Image (cartoon, helix red, strand yellow):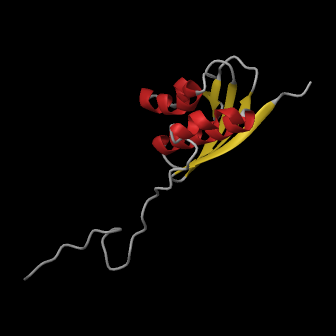
Amino acid sequence: MAVKYVSGVGKRKTSIARVYLVKDGKGSITINHRSLEDYFKRPTSRMVVEQALNLTQTLGKVDIRVTVVGGGLSGQAGAIRHGITHALLNMNPEFRAVLKASSLITRDARIKERKKYGLRSARARFQFSKR
């Protein structure tokens, strides 16, 4: 018997998350072969990951397997949330209104601004000395 799953890809900053969501599951969330509590020690990161599941009342009803690469833990949590949102939409398009109201469908396009030549960083100038 084939496992019924849907997938979604999420991005945030430089992190990319591939999310596989099994419809009839026990509620386990596995990130890079580790449990959610083991991967994200901070409760706020865990809350970000579970946000879309709480809004759609699917927390504990689906199994989630995530492969995430790049960035830091905060960016990875945002990428996983974005990927879970898209997987939930692929599973049930009726969730769109709830998820859109919380603006979870839209990718957060804010990324690090590049350093410009002649400057110390993206916008900061070198220290000016009169003498």
Quadrant of the image occupied by residue 42:
top left
Image-based side of 98 in relation to 130, left or right: right
Q: Quadrant of the C terminus?
A: bottom left
Count all numbered tags in the image, as a single digit. 0
At 43% from the left and 59% from the top, the residue drawn is: 112
The percent position of residue 107, horizontal first and vertical second, equals 55, 50
At 31% from the left and 75% from the top, the residue drawn is: 119
The percent position of residue 110, horizontal first and vertical second, equals 46, 56
Q: Which residue is situated farthest in the bottom direction here?
A: 131
Q: Is residue 75 above or below residue 21?
A: below
| Residue toward you, 4 or 58 | 58
Q: Is residue 18 above or below residue 94?
A: below
At 55% from the left and 27% from the top, the residue drawn is: 55
At 64% from the left and 28% from the top, the residue drawn is: 30
Quadrant of the image occupied by residue 2:
top right
Q: Which residue is situated farthest in the left direction here?
A: 131
The percent position of residue 113, horizontal first and vertical second, equals 42, 64
Image-based side of 87 in relation to 112, left or right: right
Q: Quadrant of the N terminus?
A: top right
| Residue toward you, 86 or 5 | 86
The percent position of residue 52, horizontal first and vertical second, equals 57, 32
